[in-house]
Structures are given as C-alpha cells and as structure tokens.
Image (spheres, helix red, strand yellow):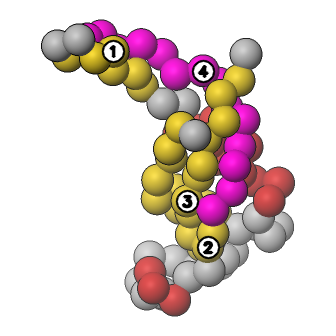
Amino acid sequence: MATEYRVKYKILPPGVGPDDYEPADLDGGEILLDLSDPDPAGFVGDHLISYGPPHSEVEKALAPHLPAGATPIILHVTKT
C-alpha cells in the first residue's frame, strides 16, 4: 500500500556544480507523490513515531517530473 506525500524540491540543472548557483535562483516546486508506507520507529510517550520513505525512493518518483538530466534537491517530505 502507498501513502501520499507532499514533496517540496529545487531543481539543479544538468552541468551545474555546487559553486555555480545560488539556492534562491533555482527553480522548484511542490508535488504530491504516492510513496511507500512509513516504517514505525517506536513510541515517544503515547505517540508512534514513523520514518518517511527512503530518500532514493523520493528521488526516483520525482525524476519523471523533472527536465532531462536535472538533479532534484529534496527540501521537505510531508505525509498528507
């Protein structure tokens, strides 16, 4: 079963290195993606804490929505 997540990201264009840009200048956006269910991590008091989907899964699911050769910079992943 999958869980819906809101993913906020920036797009690093192909051929751009770490010294070639200012983060505020990068395009980005938000998208809803169905990703694997969160794994339980344990309890804190009465609250169940869960891990989100693996970073590699988020990048793979986001890749078809990016320009060819671009690299995603994942800023935030939130369960909806």
Mark closest to the chain's N terminus, 4 or 2 = 2
Q: Are marks 4 and 3 in contact (CB under 8 Å)?
A: no
Residue drawn at the location 56% of the way across and 63% of the way down: 9
Most common secondary structure along the magenta stretch: strand
Helix, strand or loop at disc 3? strand
Distance Cα–Cα, label 4 vs label 3: 18 Å
Q: Quadrant of residue 16?
A: bottom right
Mark closest to the chain's N terminus, 4 or 1 = 4
Helix, strand or loop at disc 4? loop
Q: Amino acid at mark 3?
A: Lys
The segment highlighted magenta reads 30-43
Q: Is residue 54 visible?
A: no
Front residue of 21/46: it is 46
Q: Amino acid at mark 2?
A: Gly
**Residue 75 percent coordinates (x, y):** 46, 59
Q: Amino acid at mark 4?
A: Asp
| Rendered-image quadrant of the N terminus | top right
Q: Which residue is mark 4?
A: 37
Residue drawn at the location 69% of the way across and 49% of the way down: 32
In this rendering, which labeled residue sits more in front, label 3 or label 1? 1
Circle 4 packing at 10 Å, graded few (<14), some (14-19), many (20+), is some
Mark closest to the chain's N terminus, 1 or 2 = 2
Mark closest to the chain's N terminus, 3 or 2 = 3
Distance Cα–Cα, label 4 vs label 2: 25 Å
Q: Which residue is mark 3?
A: 8
Helix, strand or loop at disc 2? strand
In this rendering, which labeled residue sits more in front, label 4 or label 1? 1
Front residue of 41/61: it is 41
Distance Cα–Cα, label 4 vs label 1: 14 Å
